[in-house]
Amino acid sequence: MEVTVAKTAGFCFGVKRAVETVYRQAEEAKGSVYTFGPIIHNDQVVSDLEDKGVQVIRSEEELELIREGTVIIRSHGVSRRVQEKIVANGLTLVDATCPFVKKIHRIVEEEGRKGRTVIIAGNASHPEVEGICGWASGPVFVVSDKTELDSLPISQDTFVTFVAQTTFNYRKFEELVEILCKKFYDSTVINTVCNATEERQAEARRIAAASDAMLVIGGRHSSNTQKLYEICRESCDNTYFIETLVDLDSKPFQSFCHVGITAGASTPNKIIEEVQKNVRIKF
């Protein structure tokens, strides 16, 4: 069997930086160490950090109860309100927000001050998007598709600035941009889809189109991994979403000649290596 593993599979720059920051703080920080939300959408990494004493704060209500220790902001970022609350509570703040996400924070803040309405292409309930909205200094809306864009309660002569969640499907972003530019007379488009995301999605699409089956590895709650799965399914009907080797059902693979493998930005290399080694040996 031929196996092709995506070169872009696994930790992206922002996730790698955030995870390394937490491990370093777990060793060096004095007192308790927390992350605001799971540092990444990967249960194995979060569990390992818990074993090292790192605790997860899952809400602002929980944050209110903490008065000492170090709080690390994950790569997704947080709202201005949460960031200020960490400092106000006398906690040590370590900001591991991805620089590409921080750039969007600055954009929505600056564009709002110019009197422009910000529209974000993304998942409104995703922590990255919630954080971005929390830096807006003016009206802000989130859309995930054409229907939501068409139903926005704003007039055509509104000055709008259009950005995207860093892991948004790049092709969908382009489609929305085309609609937006026709809909609004004064629209500014800033492509904030991360380059690593674009490359990962494009490579996954190419490999899936050339494979009999496709394995997408990543956490079930990982937005970017879910998008990879959707992209691969468009080109390869036999696409499977797994978190670890334990989830891999070997039966369907007996008849495949070429298997492609990709993984989300929160998937450790160890898990990717375990899966590809197992596929090569057993199939």
Image: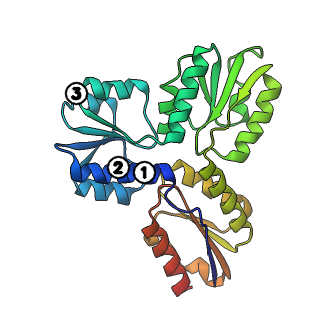
Residue 4, image x and y in percent?
A: 63, 74
Task: Give the residue drawn at x 21%, y 46%.
Answer: 29
Q: Residue at x 57, y 21 (%)?
A: 110
Please give the label number shown on residue 90: 3
Q: Is residue 249 left or right of residue 111?
A: left
Most foreground residue, 140 or 91: 91
> Disc 2 on helix, strand or loop?
helix
Disc 2 target residue: 21
Q: Residue 129: x percent and y percent?
A: 53, 34
Q: Which residue is mark 1?
A: 17
Amino acid at pointer 2: Thr
In the rendered image, the quadrant that contains the N terminus is bottom right
The answer to the question of whether label 1 and label 3 lie on touching residues, with beta carbons closer than 8 A, is no
Mark 1–mark 3 Cα distance, whole angstroms, equals 25 Å
Which sits in the foreground, 200 or 148?
Answer: 200
Q: Position of residue 34 (x, y in %)?
A: 27, 42
